[in-house]
Each structure stands twice: as C-alpha cells, then as structure tokens.
Image (cartoon, rainbow, N blue to C red):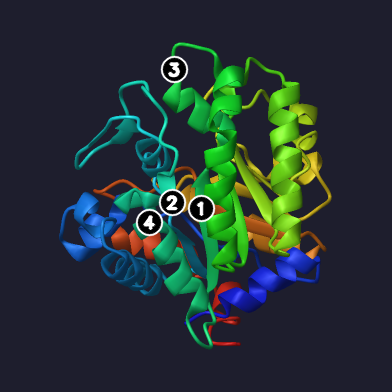
Amino acid sequence: MSAGRTLLNQFLRGEPQIRPVLVPLFGLLLARVESKPYEEIISNPGDWTAALLKTMDLLQTDGVIAGYDDAILAQAIDAPVAMDAATVGVTVAAGALADEPLQHPGLAAAVETVKRLAASAGRSYACIAGMTGPGKLSNQLFPSGGIEAGMRSVKKQYLAVSESYLKTRPDMLLLFEQMGSMGGSISSVFARLYSTLRNQAAYYNIPLAVYFEAYHPDHMEQLSSLKPDITILGRDIHGNEPGLALALQFTDKPAGIGINLEDPEHAAALVQAACSACRGGRNLLLTSLGSPGMDVNLDSLRSVFRNSGEIEETRGQG
C-alpha cells in the first residue's frame, strides 16, 4: 500500500512533495475488475467499498475517489437515469424535486461507501469524497435552460447532501463541475452557493476541491472567483487536455490536473513532469480525465503509476 494519505496531507499543507498525489477516477472500470455489472456494484456499499480498494491495490494508486457517480445525485433528486455498460447519464429532465434525496438508496449507498473508506482504522490511503457540482447538477436536471433558477431550486437538497459527505470525514470533498453550461460567466447565485459550500466545508475542517470541465482557457479568472481550496483542471470547452503548464501558471496554490489514461505513454510523461515540478516546490495532484475505458490495457495503466523509480521510492512509506 502506498503512503497516499501522507502524500495528500503534504499536498494540502503545501509541504514539499517528492511526487504528486495520484488518485484517478475508477468509474466503470470497477465493473471490469469485479466482473459484475457497474450498477450492481454501486448499489451496495460493501461491494462498492471492496471494488474501490481492490482497484486501488491493482493499479497502485494513492487512494480512491469514493461515493462519486455522474448520475446518482440527479437520480436522487428525481431525474430519470439510464445506465448501461458503456455510459452513465441523465437523460430526462426532472419533474418534482425530492425533498429528501438522502433517502434514495443509491445516494445512501454512496455516502455509506465514503463513510466506510474514510473511517477505516489506520488507513494509509487517501479518501476523497466525490460529488456532482451544483452547476453541473442544475444542468443535468434542467437541460433546457434555467440553470440559475435550478440552482435556487436544489440549494436546500444540495447542501444537505454535501453536509452528509462532510460528516463522513474524508480527506477532501471534490465537486465535479461543468462550466460550459454557465455561458462563460459566474452568476451571483452560483457564487453565493459556493461561498456557502466553502463555509460548510470549513466548519468540518475538510478542504473543498473543484474539478472543472468545459471551462474557457481565456477565462480562468472565472474559476478562481469561486475560491475553492484546490482547483483541478479537466478538459476545456474545446475538449483539449489541460496540460501541466496551464495548472502551474493558473495558481501557485495546491492544484491538480486530469491526465489521459487512455494514452499511457503520454500520461507517464506527465507524471514524470509533475514529479519534477514537485521537486521544484509545487504541490500537485493528478487524477484522470474521466474514468478509464472498459477496454483499457490494465498493465499499461498500472505502469503509469508504478513503473517510475522516483515513485517507487515512496511506496510503502507511511
């Protein structure tokens, strides 16, 4: 087991890192590792917990992003959801919103999964709780428009769910946000909701991170205006990968990027570049651009995280 939690704590505190924290999304890859349907795995906290730990050990990553599925939160707030082996997504706009989304069995399983992983006695791995961001959720529920009104509609339910994740005491709460639906600007409603989320996370002393997708690379100040503790960059509005240089230029605070695990050779080069940046005094976390595909070569994927002398030096240290 890697010293993932130690590395994550160094990252969060801005202390020197020998290398970046490596915590990808696993997503549908869990179904391949466990040889059972994805929706069956995530419906049971015991199965979901075991699958995340097994995949973490298989790939030799530093931890898990737990309790995250792209559709669960929207489903719990009453959007019909279609799931199959290839895609997971919200397909129909919500009708009446549920008053008690935490009673939904899928969301309850997600929160319980985070609780089990975060509470594991003596754990050395990083446990990051993942949750759909409020802007992305509003776009899922109200795809025909009215996202700002949608955020007002879901605020009460959203804050109840985010608090339930925070109460499990993960090492970080990570919100997955899609900026393309925002029209290139941050509304006052969006900004106020994020202010509340920052205060809520601070109350529990849990760092708040945001994974931004579909942002405009010329409007990076819009992302910084939400003031998360950690900013992680995914693909921009043109579908381009962020690259390490953009993250390093964007902020001098602890930051992260998604790397393309479908291209292991390129991803391994980015890991090496991130190791060099860490030795130069930067604090970095690497995750993935979405979850790896079901047909990804697992040996190649494992090599992205494992086959580096610099990285191997830190394995097994607690």
Question: Disc 1 designates what residue?
Answer: 130
Which-is-in-front pick, marks 1 and 4? 4
Q: Are marks 1 and 2 in contact (CB under 8 Å)?
A: yes
Residue at (52, 79) in percent of width and height: 2
- Give the Cα separation between the discs numbered 3 and 4: 25 Å
User: Within 10 Å of the Cα at label 2, are there few (<14), some (14-19), or many (20+) other Cα atoms?
Assistant: many
Q: Secondary structure at mark 2?
A: loop
User: Within 10 Å of the Cα at label 3, are there few (<14), some (14-19), or many (20+) other Cα atoms?
Assistant: some
Q: Is residue 149 visible?
A: yes
- In the image, what residue type sits under mark 2? Tyr
Q: Which mark is residue 108?
A: 4
Q: Which one is earlier in the sequence, the residue at label 1 or at label 4?
A: 4
Q: Which one is earlier in the sequence, the residue at label 3 or at label 4?
A: 4
Question: Disc 2 designates what residue?
Answer: 68
- In the image, what residue type sits under mark 3? Pro
Q: Residue furthest left?
A: 36
- Please name whichever residue, 196 or 132, is drawn nearer the observer in this view of the structure: 196
- Give the Cα separation between the discs numbered 1 and 3: 22 Å
Question: Disc 3 designates what residue?
Answer: 143
Q: Which one is earlier in the sequence, the residue at label 3 or at label 2?
A: 2
- Please name whichever residue, 264 or 151, is drawn nearer the observer in this view of the structure: 151
Q: Are marks 1 and 4 in contact (CB under 8 Å)?
A: no
Residue 303 point in image, percent of width and height: 42, 65
Q: Is residue 270 visible?
A: no
Residue 274, by quadrant, is bottom right
Q: Are marks 2 and 4 in contact (CB under 8 Å)?
A: no
Q: Are marks 1 and 3 in contact (CB under 8 Å)?
A: no
Q: Which one is earlier in the sequence, the residue at label 2 or at label 4?
A: 2
- Give the Cα separation between the discs numbered 3 and 2: 21 Å
